[in-house]
Amino acid sequence: MDLAWTDFLNSLVRDWRGGGGPAEDHLAQPAWQSAFLAKWGLDAPVPAATADLDAARRLRALLLDLAARVLDGGTIPADGIGALNAALAGAPVRRTLEAGGEHAYAVRLGPAATGWTVVLGEVAASFARTLAEMDPARIRLCANPDCRWAFYDDTRNGSKRFCEPSTCGNLMRVRRFRRRRT
């Protein structure tokens, strides 16, 4: 399942094969910024200013911490909720009435402004909607300790452990097999 907050968290790309290489931060790359904004229908100047990148990195660290707490079966502390609410405040919404859809009309929510503060607020809102409207117990971090990408487990039985079974899942199965053989 594709969610804005998981895309945002996964902007920090680690060496998932475990070679010890440095993590690559895509947040600072204008190409990644443009693709992210286009994918999620958001508007902000590219490249992002240094202050906006700093705020984005702080939000990414916060969301990673909150996701890890939920993954461990814990609850989000009051200061975490406060920090998430502060990010949400940066994204005022506008309601519009549209014709069509399942019913004759639909009310749509959209950002009331533009800029990186709004983008970060929308990312925080995506995480908040996951907590409030979906099953928070299905928030996962890849079980490959060298990867740790975030994802939402939408499998039927809720047993997904790896971001991608064909990459991280296969790598970890091969490592387990080789450990047993030695």
Image (tube, rainbow, N blue to C red):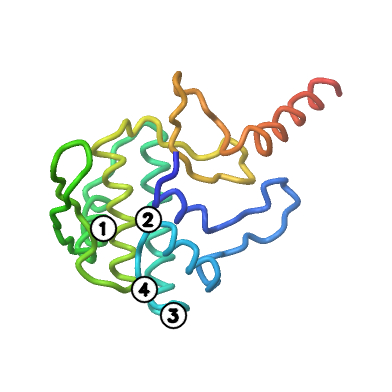
Q: Secondary structure at mark 3?
A: helix
User: Vertical placement of 161 versus 38: above or below?
Assistant: above
Residues at discs 2 and 1 in contact (Cβ within 8 Å): yes
Mark 4 and mark 1: span between their CA atoms?
Answer: 22 Å
The span from disc 2 to disc 1 (Cα, nearest Å) is 8 Å
Q: Looking at the picture, which amino acid does disc 3 mark? A: Thr
| Gap in angstroms between the C-alphas marked 2 and 4 | 21 Å
Hey, what amino acid is under mark 2? Leu
Q: Which residue is mark 1?
A: 83
Which of the labelled discs sits on residue 44, or is there none? 4
Q: How many circles with numbers are drawn on the protein?
A: 4
Distance, label 3 to label 2, CA atoms, is 18 Å
Q: Residue placed at 21% from the left, 48% from the top?
A: 78
Give coordinates of residue 109: x percent, y percent.
Answer: 20, 54
Give 28 or 178, whichever is nearer the viewer: 28
Classify residue 120 by image quadrant.
Answer: bottom left
Label 2 element class: helix
Q: Quadrant of residue 1?
A: top left
Residue under label 2: 62
In this view of the protein, which residue sits in the foreground, 15 or 117? 117
Dots 4, 1 in contact, CB < 8 A: no
Could you tell which of marks 3 and 2 lies nearer the N-terminus?
3
The residue that disc 3 covers is: 50
